[in-house]
Image (cartoon, rainbow, N blue to C red):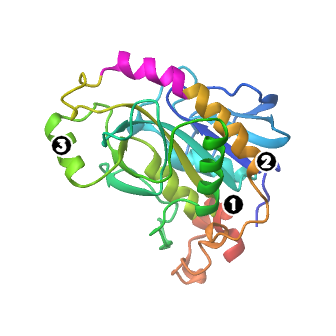
Amino acid sequence: MSQPLIGVAIGIIGGSGLYEMEGLKVIDEVCLETPFGKPSDAYILGELEGRKVAFLPRHGRGHRISPSELNFRANIWGMKKLGVDTIIAVSAVGSMKKEIEPGHMVIIDQFFDRTKGRVATFFNDGIVAHITFADPVCPELRKNLIASGKKVGATVHEKGTYLCMEGPQFSTRAESNLYRQWGVDVIGMTNLQEAKLAREAEICYATIALSTDYDCWHEGHEDVTIEAVLSVLQKNVETAKKMVREAVALVSAGRSCGCRSSLKHAILTDRSKIPPETKTRLEIIAGKYW
């Protein structure tokens, strides 16, 4: 199997507002070419709380990439190539529940997909794999994020369902009210595809969702505007950075979750029938299984 480029254990994907990490001792920046195209930006490699980490701004520095344009496969493949086995994602979201106020943090445990045709698998072009995704985020990493949030004094909701919409426009009022009837907790535009691909890559993945607004369903609040979002986001991001630092220190190498072996029984294709070019492209992801 192709070996990781660098022995980085923990990846951090920063969403809107989180483009850099204070406290990160930067050692290098790595620009990767992947079989799936270019990642969002260079991976910033360094040390945080004594751990080797790789930081990637999801939308690129300067927020250049729309949610629908994100190359999720390249981003996750690049993390795997660097040796990452754990990804902490940070993402701004709208709240769909009154009790999840702007400024609160939600540690996501479920997703609901409302995107349109995004590519969210490494397995095509002659290979088929069906991973288990009933519980889409790493349970052990979630516990670390909950503990880190409490330690820094954040208001933390310990679970929540994230509805992933296409964007980049915010919801209509009709959509927002319908989603509330479905019982979802927050709404965002990016994290579901990351979670699917991380699971296929046998990487532990969990999300800190930063509530910035009440979408447009709440009659007692103004409709969501980018100005209001940015105002709350600025405060949220500082808390999220503290949470990430605490969580990085808590991540253990010896976990018992099933994320690290999610492909063990998932690949259905006869190994002799997999095209050589497909095997080459997926060597870093699944090479140990052939």
Few, some or many C-alpha atoms within 10 Å of disc 3 (few <14, some 14-19, many ≥20)?
A: some
Q: CA distance from mark 3 to mark 1?
A: 43 Å
Three-letter amino acid code at the position of disc 3 = Asn
Magenta-drawn stretch, dominant element (helix, strand or loop): helix
Three-letter amino acid code at the position of disc 2 = Val
Few, some or many C-alpha atoms within 10 Å of disc 2 (few <14, some 14-19, many ≥20)?
A: many
Image quarter (top left, top right, bottom left or bottom right) of the N terminus:
bottom right
Image quarter (top left, top right, bottom left or bottom right) of the C terminus:
bottom right
Local secondary structure at mark 2: loop
Q: Which mark is residue 284?
A: 1
What residue is shown at x 64% (from left), y 32% (from top)? 241
Check if residue 228 falls in the magenta segment.
Answer: yes
Q: CA distance from mark 3 to mark 2?
A: 43 Å
Q: Which residue is label 3 attached to?
A: 177
Quadrant assignment, res 211: top left
Q: Are marks 3 and 2 in contact (CB under 8 Å)?
A: no
Three-letter amino acid code at the position of disc 1 = Ile
Q: Position of residue 143 (x, y in %)?
A: 62, 56
Q: Are marks 3 and 1 in contact (CB under 8 Å)?
A: no
Q: Which residue is label 2 attached to?
A: 8
Is residue 78 left or right of 18 when viewed as pictured? right
Q: Which residues are magenta?
A: 225-236
What residue is shown at x 23% (from left), y 47% (from top)? 180
Q: Position of residue 42 (x, y in %)?
A: 67, 32
Considering only order in the chain, which callout, 2 or 3, is on the residue closer to the N terminus? 2
